[in-house]
Image (tube, grey):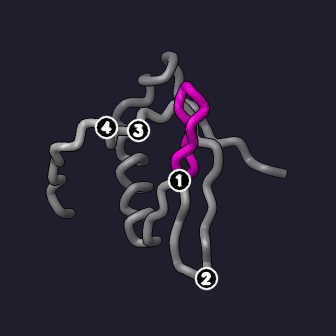
Amino acid sequence: MRPIKKTAKVDSRFDAETVVRTATVTESGRFEIELRDSQGTICVVSLPLSAAVDLGCLISDMSEAAPYLIGGFRRTRSVKK
């Protein structure tokens, strides 16, 4: 994994409040995450599938190490029927 380069632009930060949607775009081989901030502004992040897998592993590792970060209990994914 490459180190993160910080830019001089301060206004490029997007503080998301919720994940609105995720989707795999198979024709382009990308994974999209749609995020919304507290003012309702939406930002879509598009990642190559390999980067999306890396991100998923990082999130999974974090959730294993710190299950009580959100309200004192471990959340589980809901199964869609």
Res 75 quadrant in image:
top right
Q: CA distance from mark 3 to mark 2?
A: 27 Å
Q: CA distance from mark 1 to mark 4?
A: 17 Å
Mark 4 element type = loop
**What residue do we see at 48% from left, 35% from top?**
16
* Discs 1/2, front: 1
Residue 11 is marked as 4
**What residue do we see at 53% from left, 53% from top?**
44
Q: CA distance from mark 4 to mark 2?
A: 32 Å
In the rendered structure, are the residues bearing label 4 and label 3 in contact, judged by CB atoms less than 8 Å apart?
no
User: What residue occupies the far right of the structure in this picture?
Assistant: 81
Tell me which label, 1 or 4, sits earlier in the chain. 4
Magenta residues (range) = 34-43
* Label 3 packing within 10 angstroms: few (<14), some (14-19), many (20+): few
> Where is the N terminus found, in terms of image quarters?
bottom left
Mark 3 element type = loop
Tell me which label, 4 or 2, sits earlier in the chain. 4
Tell me which label, 1 or 2, sits earlier in the chain. 2
Which three-letter amino acid code belongs to the residue tagged 1? Val
Residue 25 is marked as none
* Discs 4/3, front: 4
> Compared with residue 50, is residue 71 higher up or lower down, i.e. above or below?
above
39 or 45: nearer the viewer: 39
Q: Which residue is label 1 attached to?
A: 44
Which three-letter amino acid code belongs to the residue tagged 3? Phe
Residue 14 is marked as 3
Q: Is residue 28 magenta?
A: no
**What residue do we see at 25% from left, 37% from top?**
10
Residue 27 is marked as 2
Which three-letter amino acid code belongs to the residue tagged 4? Asp
